[in-house]
Image (cartoon, grey):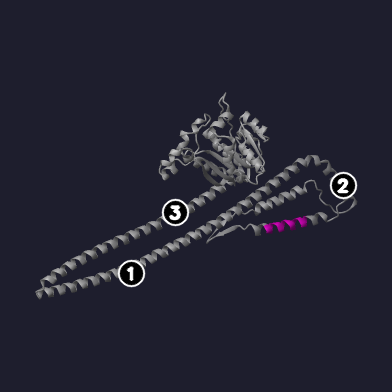
């Protein structure tokens, strides 16, 4: 059906009005600056990018259209010829049109990411303003305390001076009375008076010295407490700012790059019955299930959970009992066969290869129990980074491993496994998780050594808790 004259101009005017309305909404929703106290944080101005996007969309829409001409037979014939040529050239410009639309979609995604960044910066600025206000209030209270202290000390010194004056006046009066008694020949009274005066002077001197020392000590402790409190507040504020900036930097880095993960096979010793080995040194399936039951609530509500190094499938059984969909992966063919015989899904594969083959953000839970101590030390950051890529935002990660802070593991079960490479400190795992973009990190000590070695109960409690705490520990984190 031929297009009515003036229809193109009408659609252009309507499109311009819609674009103007959207621009006004964007400006009202995303201001250029965010107030933080007396200063302001400048945010990125996205309007030039929006204008460029709108212009590009207009050009995309204009590809393949025919410019209107005045009415008339000749012009109608020319318009028909143009439309025919445009349809004949449709195959030639189709790829260009698709490319242009893809570029516009890319610009739209960039705009949305920058808007999210502006909102994050605004929230961070507001939080920093509130913390600075709280710190200022605490400093004001400290100044008030110091002012009251100075006022009290001034009053005390004044009262002390008055007391000394009264004391000296009383001594002078006693001395005059003593002289008078001596002149009157009452030597016995003078002797007793001299003894009383000496005792009084000694007692007053001791009390004055004790009071002065106590006052000086109280002042010193107060100043130390104030100084320590200011130092603690400053460290907390600096640590919070550093943590927020690092999290923001990690989010931007994860949006801009695709991390590469190296691959390594899990070492196995030939000719060893690993199921019998696990029964003796890891424990029965019932005991392992009882120990891992604590993690069921951590994965409640998940739909796509992977158990890295599933072994005999104890964790998969717990997930099935809780109605949570889970799948296992293990390098041992006998372990995978055992898990499948129980009716659960499992794959025989290297855990790095398995995770690398999954789509990014396709999982909402990863469980990894007693695996990282089998890996070379340089592979642990790769495993953490790969897990961060495969988990969706808010996805859960649980890692359990022997605790090197407990010296008892080196005398019991750690070196009993020939595939153990080295124990991994909890602080190192937490550092790798923070660098990979995880938050809400929690470290839980497990299996107190005193329960397994009764002789440890004879040690002092503080020493036992420091060097013989939990045989294992678990680290729980969420993908930011």
Residue 155's label in the rendered image is: 1
- Say which residue label 3 marks: 232
Left or right: residue 184 compared with residue 433: left
Taking the view exactly as shown, the residue that stands out farthest to the top is 271
The magenta span reads 12-25
Name the residue nearer the viewer: 306 or 1.
306
Q: Nearer the viewer, residue 455 or 108?
A: 455
Q: Residue at x 65, y 46 (%)?
A: 301
- Looking at marks 3 and 1 on the same chain, the residue that comes earlier in the sequence is marked by 1
Q: Residues within 10 Å of mark 1 (few under 14, many from 20)?
A: few
Q: Position of residue 25 (x, y in %)?
A: 68, 58
Which mark is drawn over residue 80?
A: 2
Say which quarter of the image contains residue 274.
top right
Q: Is residue 82 left or right of residue 239?
A: right
Q: CA distance from mark 2 to mark 1?
A: 105 Å
The tag earlier along the polypeptide, 3 or 2, is 2
- Seen in the picture, residue 78 relative to 371 is either above or below; the reply is below
Res 362 visible: no
Q: Say left or right for 173 vs 431.
A: left
Question: Please, is residue 41 above or below residue 409 in the view?
Answer: below
For residue 247, say whether it is visible. yes
> In this rendering, is residue 5 above or below 372?
below
């Amino acid at each position: 059906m031929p297009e009515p004259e003036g229809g193109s101009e009408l659609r252009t005017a309507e499109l311009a009005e819609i674009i103007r309305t959207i621009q006004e909404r964007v400006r009202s929703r995303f201001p250029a600056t965010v107030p933080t106290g007396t200063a302001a944080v400048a945010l990125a101005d996205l309007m030039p990018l929006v204008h460029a996007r709108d212009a590009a969309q207009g050009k995309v829409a204009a590809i393949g259209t025919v410019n209107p001409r005045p009415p008339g037979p000749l012009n109608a014939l020319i318009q028909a010829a143009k439309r025919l040529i445009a349809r004949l050239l449709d195959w030639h410009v189709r790829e260009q049109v698709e490319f242009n639309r893809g570029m516009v979609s890319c610009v739209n995604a960039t705009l949305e990411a920058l808007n999210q960044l502006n909102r994050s910066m605004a929230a961070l600025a507001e939080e920093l303003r509130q913390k600075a206000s709280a710190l200022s209030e605490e400093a004001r209270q400290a100044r008030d305390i110091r002012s009251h202290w100075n006022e009290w000390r001034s009053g005390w010194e004044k009262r002390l001076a008055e007391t000394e004056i009264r004391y000296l006046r009383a001594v002078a009066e006693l001395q005059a009375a003593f002289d008078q008694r001596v002149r009157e020949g009452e030597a016995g009274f003078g002797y007793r008076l001299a003894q009383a005066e000496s005792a009084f002077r000694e007692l007053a001197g001791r009390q004055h010295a004790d009071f002065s020392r106590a006052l000086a000590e109280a002042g010193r402790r107060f100043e130390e407490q104030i100084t320590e409190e200011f130092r603690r507040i400053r460290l907390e504020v600096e640590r919070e700012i550093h943590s927020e900036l690092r999290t923001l930097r990690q989010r931007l880095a994860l949006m801009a790059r695709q991390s590469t993960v190296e691959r390594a096979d899990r070492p196995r010793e030939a000719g060893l019955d690993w199921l019998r080995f696990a029964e003796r040194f890891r424990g029965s399936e019932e005991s392992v299930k009882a120990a891992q039951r604590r993690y069921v609530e951590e994965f409640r509500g998940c739909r796509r959970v992977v158990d890295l190094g599933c072994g005999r499938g104890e964790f998969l059984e717990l997930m099935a009992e809780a109605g949570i969909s889970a799948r296992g992966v293990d390098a041992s063919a006998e372990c995978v066969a055992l898990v499948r015989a129980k009716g659960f899904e499992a794959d025989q594969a290297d855990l790095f290869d398995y995770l690398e083959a999954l789509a990014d953000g396709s999982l909402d839970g990863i469980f990894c129990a007693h695996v990282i101590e089998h890996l070379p030390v340089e592979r642990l950051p790769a495993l953490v980074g790969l897990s961060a890529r495969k988990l969706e935002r808010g996805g859960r990660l649980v890692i359990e491993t022997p605790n090197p802070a407990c010296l008892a593991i080196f005398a019991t079960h750690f070196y009993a496994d020939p595939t153990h490479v080295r124990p991994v400190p909890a602080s190192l795992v937490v550092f790798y998780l923070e660098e990979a973009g995880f938050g809400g990190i929690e470290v839980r000590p497990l299996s107190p050594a005193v329960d397994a070695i009764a002789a440890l109960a004879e040690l002092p409690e503080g020493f036992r808790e420091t060097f013989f705490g939990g045989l294992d520990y678990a680290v729980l984190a969420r993908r930011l």
